[in-house]
Image (cartoon, rainbow, N blue to C red):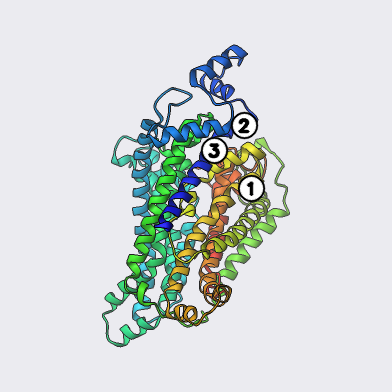
Amino acid sequence: MLGTLGRAGALAGTAAGLALVVAALPWLRGDDPARSVLRARLSEREPDRAALDAVRAELDLPAHPAAGAADWLLGAATGDLGRSWVDGTPVRATVAAAAGASVTLAAAACVVAVLTALLLVAPVAWNAAGTGRRWSSGPRVMAAGTAALPEFVLAAVLLTLVAVRWRLAPAAGWFGPSYVVLPALALGVPTGGMLARLVVTAVDTTAAEAWVRTWRTAGCPRATLAVAVARRAGTVVVPQVAILFVGLLGGAVAVEELFAVPGVGRLALRAALAQDLPVVQGCVLLLILAGAVMGAAGVAAHRGLLGPAGAAGLVPAAPVRRPRRWRIPLAVGTLLAGAVTTGLLRDPDRVRLDRRLGDPSWAHPLGTDPVGRDVLAQFGNGALLTIGTAAAVTALALLVGLAVGLRGTRARAGGADVLNALPPVLVGLVIAAVLGPGLLPAATAAALVAWVPLAVHTRNLADETRAGGHHQAAVLAGAGTRWILRRHLVPAVAGPVVVHALTRIPGTALAIAALGFLGLGAGHDTAEWGTQLAAAVDYLERAPTAVAAPVAGLTLLGVLAAYAPEDVR
C-alpha cells in the first residue's frame, strides 16, 4: 500500500514539476506571456501597452509561473485543461483529437517494428535451437544498420518515391487507413532494428542457459525450442516495446510534420513555439499518463513472460567468451575512418554557387551540397561534431541509467517511464529557452531523455538477477547491499546495457540532428551531419549523395556498434 502511494506521489510530483516548468517557459525566455500571445495571434500588430493589457484581462494570465502552474493543476484535477491562448478552443478537445491520431500512428509503427524485429531475429532463434550457435553476424549487422536509419530521411524517401513518383500511397494528410502506412513504416522500421538488436543479444545469452541444453538433449522439437528461446529472450525486450510506444506517441515530431499528421508531437511543438502554454501543458499531461500506464503494462508483461522462473529463480548461464570477428568491423571502421580523414583534409566552408548540387566528380567525389560546398569535406568535419557529441551524451546517459536502474529492489513503473514519454524536441525547447539554440543545448536535451531506456533495461535485468537462486542465497547468508551490488548485480547487467548504449549512439546523434533540423541545435552553417541532412533532404532527387553521405556514416556507426563485445564486465 505504501509502495503504491509512493509511486502515485512520485508521478503526481513529476506532473506538477513539469507543469511548473512549462508555465515558466515565457519567463525562461525572458519574455512577457501577453507579448507572446499577441505575437502568435497578430504578428503584424505592435505590442503596445493597451494591447498587452487587453490580452492579460481576456486570458487572465498569471503574474508568475507558480500561480499559473497551480491554477492549471487545479483545473486539470477536475478535467478542465483550460482554453488555448491563441484561438480560444478547449484544450481537452484539441489534445484528445491529436491523441487519437498519435495513438493510431504509434500502434501501427509498433506493429511494423515488431514484424521487422521478428524477421531479423527468427534465424538467430532457429540456429540457437538447433545447434546452439550463439554468434549471428548477419542479423546483427542488419539490425544495427536498420536502427541507424534516420526516420525523417526514410520518411522523405518514402514520400518522394512511393507517394509522389509511384503514387502508391497518399503523400500527406490524415483522412483514412491508407494515410497511416508511410508514416508507420518511417517510424517502425528503425525502431524494429533497435528491438532486433536487443533480442539478438538476449538470444545469444539465453542459448547458453542450462535449460536450453537440457531441452535439446531430451529431443525437444526444434521449432518448440526456438519459440521458447525467443520467449525467454523477449522478457528483456517487452518493457522496451512499452516505452517505445510512448516514445513514438510524442516523439514522432519530424515525421508528423513531414506527412502533416495532426498528432500530439506536432501539436506540442507548434504550441510551444507559439507560447500556447495551456496546450503544451495538456500534451505533457497526456504523455505523463501514457508513460505511467505503458510503463506499468511493460513491467506486468515482463513478469508474465518470466512465469514460474520469476518466483523459482533462473540459473544464469556461465560466462562464455564469444568468438571475436574482426573482419567486418575492421573493414567498416577503416572505411569510415578513411572517409572522415579524407574529408578533414578538405575545405568544408568554401561556397561555390556555380557548382551547387553538383554530381560526384574527381574534384568532388561525393558531389556538392545546395550551396556548392564539398559534401566529402562536410562529411569529414561533421563526423567530429556528430559522433563526438553523441558518444559523450551516451556515456553520460549510461552512467545515469545504470545508477537509476540498479536503485531499489523491484522493477516497477515510475518516473523513468514518464520522462521517456517526453519528446527530445519538447525538452530542447525548454533548454533552448534558457541557454539559447546551439549544439550544447541540443546535447543537453538529448542527454535528459537518453538515459531512460538504459535505466529501464537495467531495471529489468536486475529484477531477473534478484530472482535467481544465487542472489537469494547471498541475501540469506547476510551479504551486504554493496557486496551484492558489486558481485552480482553490476556484473549481470553491465555487459548487455553497455551494448545497448553503444547501439543507441546513432539514435542519439539523430535526436541531436532533429533538434538542429528544427532550428534548436547546431547552426545551419556548421558541418554537423543532422544539419547536412536538413539542408539536403529537400533535394533528394537532384543530389542523392548529399543525403546518402551522412546516412551512410550513421549506418556504418551502427554496424560498428553491433560488434561491441557482449561480455563486458
Residue 73 position, x and y percent, is 46, 36
Q: Front-most of 384 and 482?
A: 482
Q: Quadrant of residue 400?
A: bottom right
Q: Nearer the viewer, mark 3 or mark 2?
A: 3
Q: Quadrant of the N terminus?
A: bottom left
x, y (%) of residue 414? 46, 54
Q: Position of residue 103 (x, y in %)?
A: 35, 44
- Choose the circle earlier in sequence order: 3 or 2: 3
As helix, strand or loop, the secondary structure at mark 2 comes to helix
Residue at horizontal 51 percent and vertical 60 percent from the top: 455
Observer-side mark, 1 or 3, equals 3
Residue at 51 percent of width and 31 percent of height:
277
Report the mark closest to the observer, 1 or 2: 2
Q: Which residue is mark 3?
A: 20
Residue located beneath label 1 in the image: 528
Verify CB contact (< 8 Å) between mark 3 and mark 2.
no
Q: Is residue 100 left or right of residue 75?
A: left
| Residue 121 badge | none
Q: Residue at x 31, y 83 (%)?
A: 215
Secondary structure found at label 3: helix
Q: Residues within 10 Å of mark 1 (few under 14, many from 20)?
A: many
Task: Return the disc, 1 or 3, that comes first in the chain's sequence.
Answer: 3
Q: Which residue is mark 2?
A: 27
Q: Amino acid at mark 1?
A: Glu
Instruction: Say few, some or many: other residues with alpha carbon within 10 Å of mark 2 (under 14 / 14 to 19 / 20 or more).
Output: some
Tag 2: amino acid:
Trp
- Residue 127 in the image: x percent, y percent? 37, 76
Report how far apart the C-alphas of labels 3 and 2 lie in the structure. 11 Å
- Amino acid type of the residue tagged 3 in the rendering: Leu
Q: Classify mark 1: helix, strand or loop.
A: loop
